[in-house]
């Protein structure tokens, strides 16, 4: 990354991840977005989070009237289904909210900027608890600014013309819909240990005939099953850390009247649990890391494969088994 006179350039901005959006957005100077007129910000959460983020953006645009902020927001599960695709396609938000459950992975992939040169200067953290600030640190680098350790959000969304896309038939169904649910997250730091997790659940109703009666539910493509994640991250020595994280996706038979594997997105979903393990640290002139994905070698189909199970070959794509990735890098 390149910087000029301590200001963030476009490449830096595209890789910023934040937990406390207001702390960063309100502190960046105009020079941070030199020669840029539009940026994209994204977050997950319910209406309260949305309102607070919009207030932060309003204050930012008042200080920076030449910068337009385009926003995206979604429930937790939908947000993290979309974010990896955006990063892969080069359309990731310039700034976005991040959960600690996924922050470590994005950091190790080099997707997030180091905010350390700006913390305490353009980014004011004086009103934050020290433990919250430490959550976003990886050694000497700071990749996120936390805003809280425990959060619970309820959400209720309605649309008079909701859209459900079928990627198998390429049909787009439009109908009134309602979606509601709850999202919770916990991130906590105690000395050299960080731990936390997330939980998300949602339900829905669809007025398929537009007759004012919401008699059916949205399919699993739109509203996934209950999801639970957890992690524990332990730092030993000064530059080494070990992290264990798990994901549980619940079972659900949302459409009992449908013959399994005959209708897109409506077959019963089988739950699964998977765990990842990683160790990383400074070794010689560089940094070494070894990661184990699906360390328990679970044999399962991910939710996306189960939702597309309608007799097509791609519906039979199992998740990868146990995998090991070893990396060693030297910066020069």
Image (cartoon, grey):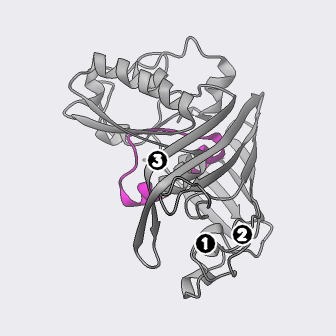
Q: Residue at x 68, y 41 (%)?
A: 182
Q: Which residue is mark 3?
A: 159
Disc sitting over residue 269 in the figure: 2
How far apart, in angstroms, are the residues tagged by discs 3 and 2? 26 Å
* Residue 102 is a magenta residue: yes
User: Quick check: 195 left or right of 327?
Assistant: right
Q: Position of residue 189 (x, y in %)?
A: 74, 30
Judge whether residue 236 can be spotted in this image. Answer: no
Name above or below for residue 143 compared with residue 64. below
Q: Quadrant of residue 94?
A: top left
Label 2 crowd (10 A; few <14 / some 14-19 / many >=20): many
Name above or below for residue 307 compared with residue 144. below
Please identify, in this view, whether the residue under mark 3 or under mark 2 is nearer the observer.
3
User: Quick check: 145 left or right of 259?
Assistant: left
| Residue range highlighted in magenta | 85-105
Q: Quadrant of residue 274?
A: bottom right
In primary-sequence order, the first of circles 3 and 1 is: 3
In primary-sequence order, the first of circles 2 and 1 is: 2
At numbered mark 3, what does the secondary structure look like: helix, strand or loop? strand
Q: Residue at x 69, y 58 (%)?
A: 225
Q: Which residue is mark 1?
A: 307
**Pointer 3 and pointer 2: residues touching (CB < 8 Å)?**
no
How far apart, in angstroms, are the residues tagged by discs 3 and 1? 23 Å
User: Quick check: 243 left or right of 100?
Assistant: right
At numbered mark 1, what does the secondary structure look like: helix, strand or loop? helix
Q: Position of residue 144 (x, y in %)?
A: 54, 33
**Pointer 2 and pointer 1: residues touching (CB < 8 Å)?**
yes
Judge whether residue 154 can be spotted in this image. Answer: yes
In this view, the residue farthest toward the front is: 211
Label 1 crowd (10 A; few <14 / some 14-19 / many >=20): many
Please identify, in this view, whether the residue under mark 3 or under mark 1 is nearer the observer.
3
């Amino acid at each position: 990354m390149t910087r000029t006179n301590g200001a963030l350039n476009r490449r830096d901005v595209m890789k910023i991840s934040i937990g406390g959006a207001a702390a960063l957005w309100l502190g960046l100077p105009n020079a941070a977005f030199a020669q840029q007129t539009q940026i994209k910000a994204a977050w997950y959460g319910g209406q309260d989070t949305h309102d607070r983020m919009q207030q932060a953006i309003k204050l930012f645009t008042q200080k920076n009237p030449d910068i337009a902020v385009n926003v995206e927001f979604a429930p937790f599960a939908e947000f993290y289904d979309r974010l990896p695709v955006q990063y892969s396609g080069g359309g990731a938000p310039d700034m976005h909210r991040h959960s600690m459950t996924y922050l470590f992975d994005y950091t190790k992939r080099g997707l997030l900027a180091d905010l350390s040169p700006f913390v305490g200067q353009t980014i004011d953290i004086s009103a934050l608890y020290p433990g919250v600030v430490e959550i976003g640190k990886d050694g000497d680098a700071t990749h996120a600014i936390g805003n809280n350790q425990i959060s619970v959000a309820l959400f209720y969304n309605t649309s008079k013309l909701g859209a459900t896309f079928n990627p198998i038939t390429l049909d787009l169904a439009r109908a009134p819909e309602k979606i509601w649910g709850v999202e919770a997250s916990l991130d906590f730091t105690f000395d050299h240990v960080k731990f936390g997790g997330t939980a998300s659940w949602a339900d829905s109703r669809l007025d398929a005939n537009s007759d004012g009666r919401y008699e059916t539910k949205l399919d699993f493509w739109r509203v996934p099953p209950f999801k639970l994640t957890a992690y524990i991250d332990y730092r030993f020595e000064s530059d080494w850390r070990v992290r264990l994280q798990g994901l549980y996706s619940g079972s659900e038979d949302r459409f009992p009247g449908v013959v399994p594997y005959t209708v897109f997105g409506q077959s019963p979903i089988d739950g699964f649990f998977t765990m990842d393990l990683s160790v990383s640290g400074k070794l010689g002139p560089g940094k070494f890391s070894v990661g184990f994905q699906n360390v328990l070698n679970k044999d399962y189909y991910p939710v996306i494969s189960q939702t597309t199970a309608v007799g097509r070959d791609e519906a039979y794509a199992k998740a990868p088994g146990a995998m090991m990735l070893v990396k060693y890098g030297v910066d020069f």
